[in-house]
Image (cartoon, grey):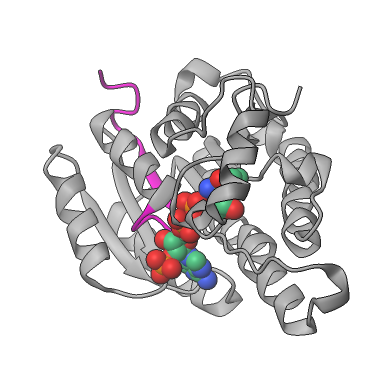
Amino acid sequence: MSLLKGKTAIITGASRGIGKAIAVKYAQEGCDVAFTDLFEDDNMKATEQELIAYGVKAKGYASDASNFEDTDRVVSEIVKEFGRIDVLVNNAGITKDTLLMRMTEDQWDAVINVNLKSVFNFTKAAQRTMLKQRSGSIVNLSSVVGVSGNAGQANYAASKAGIIGFTKSVARELGSRGVRSNAIAPGFIITEMTGKIPEDARKAWEASIPLKRGGTPEEVAGVATFLASDLSSYVSGQVITVCGAMNT
Ligand code: NAP
């Protein structure tokens, strides 16, 4: 299939996990992919080669998504190299889970900056190009806990709820210029992020999910492909939940 042929995407935090699965799926669909990660390491090089093997142009860039100037620099470099931005996937994210009574200011700031400020940074830097093109699709990784909240994740849930408000505002602001903005709210997806959760807690989560299992990064990537493609040309300002019916 070539649902994304002729398009160029930027994906943040894509050397592993959900970001990498999205990058691979986009490349399989014929999309050129510029992706970022904190460091230019073996993971980044391997991902770059994996994407190029699908016959598309792909390049990894080291950048801190939470840093405004660094983001502006990297997006300018990407536009110079790739010429356009059709899709922006704001995926980079971290957790620093703890109860509010133990949460430090640093833990709060780190999660808000990496998860939420990064979405502002990249959308602001990419919108110039999308507005000139009069087209674009922005896909933001929120979470079911951004809708429901979660004990021990006040910082993370606040950042993911913020992403939903941001996504809907951008859809209203940029819609008249052909730019769409949507969020994906994954539930329990099996990656290194959820790998930190103790075995018994993970089993309890899985038992509470109607589909009786965690999701895969590829299952989130399928929805991210739909939102990037012209199949979703009249879908904007929405939050699509990918959670095996956990949040219904
Ligand atoms: P992950 O496996 O921990 O991967 C996160 C990626 O983000 C890594 O590549 C990481 O880079 C990168 N990253 C972290 N900080 C960064 C920064 N400052 N600048 C640039 N890149 C940075 O996470 P995941 O499970 O794939 O999650 C991806 C997104 O989905 C996140 O936004 C997460 O909140 C969201 N989500 C995940 C789940 C889930 O169950 N897994 C559920 C709901 C929502 P390094 O390799 O350098 O650390």
Q: Is residue 47 visible?
A: yes
- Name which residue lies at 25% across and 18% down: 1
| Rendered location of residue 196, percent (x, y) | 52, 60
Q: Position of residue 133 (x, y in %)?
A: 49, 40
- Measuring from the top left, give residue 128's x and y in whole percent: 56, 54
Give left or right: position of 175 versus 212. right
The residue lying toward the viewer, choosing from 248 and 170, is: 248
Name the foreground residue: 20 vs 60.
20
Give the main secondary structure, helix, strand or loop, of the magenta stretch: loop
- Residue situated furthest right in the rendering: 101
Which quarter of the image is occupied by the C terminus? top right
Please report the residue visible at 52 percent of the width from the left and 29 percent of the height from the top: 213
Question: What range is drawn magenta here?
Answer: 1-16
What residue appears at the point 70 percent right and 33 percent down from the top-left corner?
Answer: 175
Left or right, 30 with respect to 187, comes to left
Whether residue 148 sits left or right of residue 51 in the image: it is right
Question: Can see residue 129?
Answer: no
Q: Is residue 137 above or below residue 35?
A: above
Position in image of residue 8 (x %, y %): 35, 42
Q: Is residue 9 magenta?
A: yes
Within the image, what quadrant is residue 28 found in? top left
